[in-house]
Image: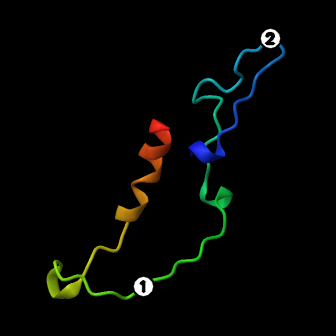
Amino acid sequence: YALFEEMLYDEQGRMRNASFSDYRIATALDMPRMTTKLVTTYEPSGPFGAKSIAEIPLDGPAPAIANA
């Protein structure tokens, strides 16, 4: 959600969306169009040459953005 965030301030410089009650959470309709491409490779350390395919590659961006 960090890439969608916009900090809104009022005339006195106070943040208008400082709590989750005022914060709009992104939904699936807010996401850009994505194209998925599967690349066939052989992984010698995996069972029968398999490697993971699921949410594992998606875990990195959020902690990286939080630590930036």
Compare marks 2 and 1 and give the one earlier in the sequence: 2
Label 2, on which residue? 12
Q: Residue at x 15, y 82 (%)?
A: 47
Relative vertical location of residue 67 with respect to residue 30 in this rendering, above or below: above
SS class, disc 2: loop
- Tag of residue 39: 1
Is 67 on the left-hand or right-hand side of 43? right
Q: Quadrant of residue 9?
A: top right
Q: Secondary structure at mark 1?
A: loop
Q: Residue furthest right?
A: 11
* Nearer the camera: disc 2 or disc 1: 1
User: Is 51 rendered above or below residue 8?
Assistant: below
Position of residue 56 relative to residue 19, above or below, is below
Residue depicted at x 18% and y 83%:
44
In the rendered view, does 44 fall on the left or right side of 59? left
Point out residue 28 in the picture as x, y percentages from the top left corner: 60, 59
- Residue at 39%, 55% in the rendered image: 59
Q: Give the image quarter of residue 55.
A: bottom left
Q: Nearer the viewer, residue 26 or 1?
A: 1
Q: Residues within 10 Å of mark 2 (few under 14, many from 20)?
A: few
How is the structure coloured here? rainbow
How many angstroms separate mark 2 from mark 1 (CA)?
A: 53 Å
Residue 11 in the image: state x and y as whole percent.
Answer: 84, 15
- Badge 1 local density, few (<14 within 10 Å), some, or many (20+)? few
Q: Position of residue 18 (x, y in %)?
A: 62, 23
